[in-house]
């Protein structure tokens, strides 16, 4: 049995057993519970007052349908967790997935001969997801099945994070992608000898929700105002947050920021393809076709492999190409970057730059396919207190670069220390 067949088998068996469990325990979503979900979504993404009444009605029906499914799913997770306990993990679509409880439930069903898999290899593949070590394990003290969908105070979608060093957590490192959480871990570890560092692991699926998710993570877990160190999309996200919530940000350091104006963006892919070997470039084009095919079902794997190829193309003299991404989230990338591209096309970053009050420092490699002039010009023209630093012999991720890593960390530490000294003087 292929891996895809094994996943389908797991989905079929587990899906049928979950439905039986739901029917046996009469799990439903009440109108009040659905309304709680709709209200939370409205606070996060308010209704467009200019929309027609028919459009508002359609939107509400859609929100209620989604709410009903999510509330049922929440109850279906909560009940087995109370019965079986076990490991809970954070997933893109479910902040509290009780995978340990699923395992206990399935073991009980298998023991009762409700299902049986005769082939040992197929049985191992079936159980793999439920018994393997998961990267996003939720500490027991943070597990909360009190509210549908894990909504905290109803004001934002829940995010997850890792912390490094000791309080106060005055630095936050922001990953790129969007949809590539985890790869800022090397930077967080390096800085944690001197600063407490928060590493948000974001999963919200729109630009607005990513901003609100980040705001909630910082308010709940950081010492405000923070210094943001954003890489790639994380630099842009930090730029947006600094404009919309200036009270949260003391300084913004942007590393390998994408270009701010659409006229510079078209050249990036051509540069990347020119740096790949012929067979790699062909593979990259095929993977992009998979991602562009609306009926393709293997987009996560294609997105992950394309990330490997582009990481290679974006580097100058890398020490490693293993960048510690925990999970490749293609749907997050597609939706969030779609919003960001539209903001860039409309000139929105220029308007946001004029609202930023904190110092902004851009650190950029001279080999980065995100063209330096597409960052430096718009930045220094629109943000009053801004500087641009170009690193020689450096690609998109300076900390993996043999010839630029030390210089990068020297600059970054100096920027963080200057912010700390400013705080102490005031």
Image (cartoon, helix red, strand yellow):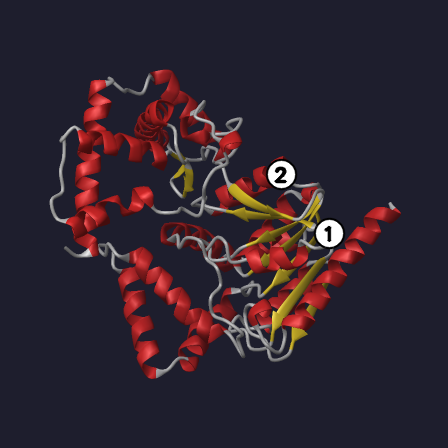
Q: Is 196 on the left-hand or right-hand side of 15?
A: right
- The residue carrying mark 1 is 358
Local secondary structure at mark 1 = loop
Disc assigned to residue 221: 2
- In the rendered image, residue 204, in percent from the top left (x then y), is placed at 45, 43
SS at circle 2: helix
In the image: residue 271, left or right of residue 26: right
Instruction: Left or right? Give the position of 409 relative to 342.
Output: right
Say which label, 2 or 1, has the lower sequence index: 2
Can residue 318 be seen at all in this image of the molecule? yes
Residue 34, above or below 331: above
At label 2, counting other C-alpha atoms closer than 10 Å, the crowd grade (few under 14, some 14-19, many 20 or more) is some
Query: Along the horizontal axis of the image, is 105 left or right of 232?
Result: left
For residue 350, above or below residue 9:
below
Q: Give the residue at x 43% y 25%.
A: 145
Q: CA distance from mark 2 to mark 1?
A: 21 Å
- Residue 267 visible (yes or no): no
On residue 128, which mark appears?
none
319 or 120, which is in the foreground? 120
Residue 411 drawn at (x, y percent): 72, 66
**Image coordinates for residue 86, horizontal then vertical, percent:** 39, 32
Quadrant of image for the C terminus = top right
Residue drawn 50% across and 27% down?
A: 154
Residue 156 x/y as whole percent: 51, 34
Q: Quick one: 158 or 155, which is closer to the camera?
A: 158
385 in relation to 215, above or below: below
Asked whether 106 or 112 is in front, the reply is 112
């Amino acid at each position: 049995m292929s891996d895809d067949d094994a996943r389908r088998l797991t989905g079929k068996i587990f899906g049928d057993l979950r439905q039986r469990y739901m029917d046996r325990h009469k799990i439903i979503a009440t109108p009040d519970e659905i309304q709680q979900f709709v209200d939370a979504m409205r606070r996060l993404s308010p209704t467009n007052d200019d929309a027609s009444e028919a459009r508002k009605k359609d939107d509400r029906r859609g929100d209620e349908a989604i709410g009903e499914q999510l509330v049922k799913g929440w109850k279906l997770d909560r009940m087995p967790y109370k019965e079986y306990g076990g490991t809970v993990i954070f997933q893109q679509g479910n902040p509290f997935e009780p995978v340990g409880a699923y395992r206990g439930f399935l073991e009980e069903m298998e023991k009762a001969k409700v299902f049986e898999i005769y082939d040992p290899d197929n049985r191992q593949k079936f159980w793999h997801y439920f018994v393997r070590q998961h990267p996003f394990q939720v500490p027991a003290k943070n597990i909360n099945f009190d509210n549908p969908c894990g909504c905290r105070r109803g004001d934002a979608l829940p995010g997850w994070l890792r912390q490094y060093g000791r309080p106060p957590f005055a630095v936050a490192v922001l990953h790129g992608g969007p949809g590539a959480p985890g790869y800022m871990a090397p930077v967080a570890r390096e800085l944690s000898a001197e600063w407490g560092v928060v590493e948000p692991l974001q999963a919200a699926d729109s630009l607005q929700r990513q901003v609100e998710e980040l705001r909630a993570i910082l308010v709940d877990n950081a010492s405000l105002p923070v210094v943001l160190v954003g890489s790639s999309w994380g630099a842009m996200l930090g730029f947006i947050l600094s404009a919309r919530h200036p009270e949260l940000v003391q300084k913004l350091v942007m590393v390998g920021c994408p270009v701010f104006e659409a006229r510079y963006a078209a050249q990036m892919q051509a540069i990347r393809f020119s740096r790949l070997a012929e067979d790699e470039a062909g593979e990259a084009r095929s993977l992009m076709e998979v991602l562009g095919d609306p009926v393709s079902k293997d987009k996560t794997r294609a997105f992950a492999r394309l990330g490997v190829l582009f990481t290679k193309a974006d580097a100058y003299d890398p020490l490693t190409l293993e960048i510690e991404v925990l999970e490749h989230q293609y749907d997050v990338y597609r939706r969030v970057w779609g919003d960001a591209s539209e903001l860039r096309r409309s000139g929105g970053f220029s308007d946001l730059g004029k609202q930023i009050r904190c110092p902004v420092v851009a650190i950029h490699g001279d080999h980065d396919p995100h063209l330096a002039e597409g960052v430096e010009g718009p930045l220094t023209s629109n943000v009053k207190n801004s500087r641009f630093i170009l690193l020689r012999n450096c690609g998109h991720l300076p900390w993996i670069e043999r010839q630029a890593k030390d210089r990068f960390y020297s600059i970054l530490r100096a920027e963080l220390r200057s912010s700390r000294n400013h705080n102490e003087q005031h």
